[in-house]
Amino acid sequence: MDYLAALTRVVDDVVGPNAAEVDRTGAFPRASLRALAEAGLLGLCSSREVGGGGEGLRAGAAVVAGLAQACGSTAMVVLMHYSAAAAIEALGPDDVRHAIAAGEHLTTLAFSEVGSRSQFWAPLSSAIPHGNVDVRLDAAKSWVTSAGEADSYVWSSRPVAAEGPLTVWLVPADTPGVSVAGDFDGLGLRGNGSRPVRGEGAVIPAANRLGEDGAGLDLALSIILPWFLIGSAAFSVGLMRAVIAETTTHLTATQLEHLGQTLARQPGLRADLAQMQITADAADALLGDCLNAVEHGREDATLRVLEVKASAGEASIDVTDLAMKVCGGAAFRRELGVERRFRDARAARVMAPTTDALRDFIGRALTGLPLLGEA
Ligand SMILES: Cc1cc2nc3c(=O)[nH]c(=O)nc-3n(C[C@H](O)[C@H](O)[C@H](O)COP(=O)(O)OP(=O)(O)OC[C@H]3O[C@@H](n4cnc5c(N)ncnc54)[C@H](O)[C@@H]3O)c2cc1C
């Protein structure tokens, strides 16, 4: 499947034209998700064995980057879908894997909690046995992208009985006792529907556990996080590419009429644009190296995976901040699109693992300390 051609079509026909309205109203981008499903892009990274596109991290990252160039909200929904789908693909039931591959099932991650906040490795929510074959989930999830829109949640809890830090479940969104517990009126990514979700006596089959009881952190670190961290970096790179293009257009198309010159004739503005390009290229190059490291099983692959989101997320904040300066008052108005990029970029810093947490993980890895626990 020529997924890049399919992506270009969907972006040009649906995602791009809807992006400003999704941002303005905060509406979930359903039309974009439908078009992506029909084009086979929601099942792109499911294995061929279940009818998916059989692609991996590199293709998933390219799709997220392409979407982020047009609509951050849609890109975030797809990023969370790919991250959660990777866990289901590895450990979930065949019927759900088939449905994801067919583009008929949207999923997402329900990790962050009201109590432990961005420290998703320490959930406070519970899973307790209910009869012989079920478990009862109780939780206060603080942010879930696509809440109330997704068909399932990949959901963390404390273990039922095991010693480990957490257990992961596949929770059908229509499970009685699972409810969306608030609205989302955010600064950026306004259409991604990141709302709180509550579990109150939500009973699911114990067989919906993804992996062993207590082994959820291994699942998160080995399968979910590479998808999320690499996809998040790709998101930031796509966003930077878009804002650099928008800034370039502004500089080359806008006149200083009293001088008879375009803004591009101002050396300071060109220097800022150059810095934007250098920052974006550096982050993109690290992302490329990370993908190579993962694909070739290089020794530094884990370190690179930890680095890419922090690198690209912070880069996109710097680049969009410069774009706001270079494009001046024009950028302050909505029509240029630059202020939307500026707002959307800021989520990466605080999405878990946050930039601060990643820097701590990287420092621990470099000094031979465990990623989590007492340092
Ligand atoms: C748009 C958006 C979409 C989201 N979608 C999802 C989703 O689909 N699923 C999901 O599970 N979550 C999601 N989240 C939640 C996200 O992953 C974080 O959990 C959340 O943003 C953290 O917010 P908080 O107020 O709880 O931050 P806090 O945890 O209170 O953090 C505040 C500050 O403390 C710092 N800090 C916290 N812990 C550490 C540490 N160990 N080391 C160093 N510094 C630390 C942080 O870096 C941050 O700067 C989403 C968030 C946003 C903004």
Image (cartoon, rainbow, N blue to C red):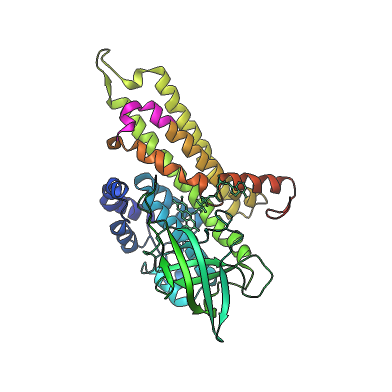
What residue is rendered at 57% in x and 70% in y? Answer: 126
Which residue is rendered at x = 26% and y = 51% of the image? 13
Which quadrant of the rendered structure holds the N terminus?
Answer: bottom left
Q: What secondary structure is the magenta-colored segment mainly? A: helix
Residue 46 shows up from this direction? no
Task: Residue 182 in the image: state x and y as whole percent.
Answer: 39, 59
Counting from the top left corner in percent of width and height, residue 327 is at 35, 28
Q: Quadrant of residue 241?
A: top left
Q: Position of residue 307 (x, y in %)?
A: 59, 45
Q: Is residue 177 visible?
A: yes
Examine the image and state in which quarter residue 197 appears: bottom left
| Magenta-colored span | 322-333
- Considering every residue shown, the one lying at the far top of the view is 259
Residue 262 position, x and y percent, is 30, 20
Q: Is residue 250 magenta?
A: no
Left or right, 37 with reference to 45:
left
Relative to 112, does residue 215 appear above or below in the rendering? below
Task: State how many labels appear.
Answer: 0
Eyeballing the image, is 252 above or below 205? above
Residue 77, by quadrant, is: bottom left
Residue ID at (49%, 62%): 141
Residue 80 horizontal side relative to residue 368, left or right: left
Q: Nearer the viewer, residue 373 or 50?
A: 373
Say which of 259 and 44 sits in front: 259
Examine the rendered structure and indicate whether residue 32 appears above or below residue 350: below
